Amino acid sequence: KQEVTQIPAALSVPEGENLVLNCSFTDSAIYNLQWFRQDPGKGLTSLLLIQSSQREQTSGRLNASLDKSSGRSTLYIAASQPGDSATYLCAVGSGGYQKVTFGTGTKLQVIP
Amino acid sequence: NAGVTQTPKFQVLKTGQSMTLQCAQDMNHEYMSWYRQDPGMGLRLIHYSVGAGITDQGEVPNGYNVSRSTTEDFPLRLLSAAPSQTSVYFCASSRNRDRGHQPQHFGDGTRLSIL
């Protein structure tokens, strides 16, 4: 059974800092991995999708990397802003038919 | 495009009542799914569908029914609500039905309280 872990559960940083969020998974036979952002009381917004054949994806100040062999993905946020404050979730597509497994998320607070 | 639309946004039910959570997408996606999100447990898959007329159970299907009569709509029914079903419910859709079902597009959620 695939298990997805995100550590830390919460993170507080001053504005302008570069930061890294971590996602680890137990079964390396994945199809893809997706990073989401969730604002309080809102749905999930897709940030980046990495296919199993890729090592990284970039969008603006965000960079996501994937190391299947070690079962890890990182989301790098450059020059953090208060507007980046949200919960960040990773979701792994793997295993049998139709399976996507979510982590429990990292709640990020960027302090002005 | 509206994307994935969920209604209602909030609902309070009494134990034993029934209701239907609505989900509609306008992206012609084959794959649709329902998740519940509970504190400390992440999102858990309830039911999913790979196309009109085809549905199957996810990780936590008990107490919920679904149907998929059209590509656009995927309603979730609670037949007899229980306090354990208090949660935030998300509907999602994706084009890719074969591998990993991502990228997924999510609705804004339905916040359901069972008294």
Image (spheres, coloured by chain):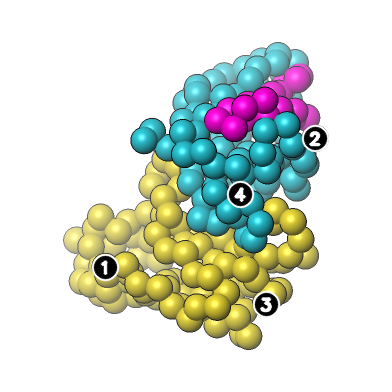
Chain colours: A yellow, B cyan
Determine the secondary structure under disc 1.
loop
Badge 1 crowding class, 10 Å Cα cut-off, few under 14, some 14 to 19, many 20 or more, is few
Marks 3,4: beta carbons within 8 A: no
Marks 4,1: beta carbons within 8 A: no
Horizontally, residue A79 falls left or right of residue B56, namely: left
Amino acid at circle 3: Ser
Determine the secondary structure under disc 4.
strand
Question: Which of A17 and B24 lies nearest the eye of the viewer?
Answer: B24
Mark toward the viewer: 2 or 1: 1
Q: Could one spot residue B36 in this view of the protein?
A: no
Marks 3,1: beta carbons within 8 A: no
Determine the secondary structure under disc 3.
loop
Query: In x, y percent, where is residue B96?
Result: 58, 53
Horizontally, residue A96 falls left or right of residue B2, namely: right
Amino acid at circle 1: Gly
Mark toward the viewer: 3 or 4: 3
Residue B73: mark: none
Q: Are marks 3 and 1 on the same chain?
A: yes
Amino acid at circle 4: Leu
Q: Which residue is mark 3?
A: A28
Residue A60: mark: 1
Q: Where's the N terminus of chain A, which quadrant?
A: bottom right
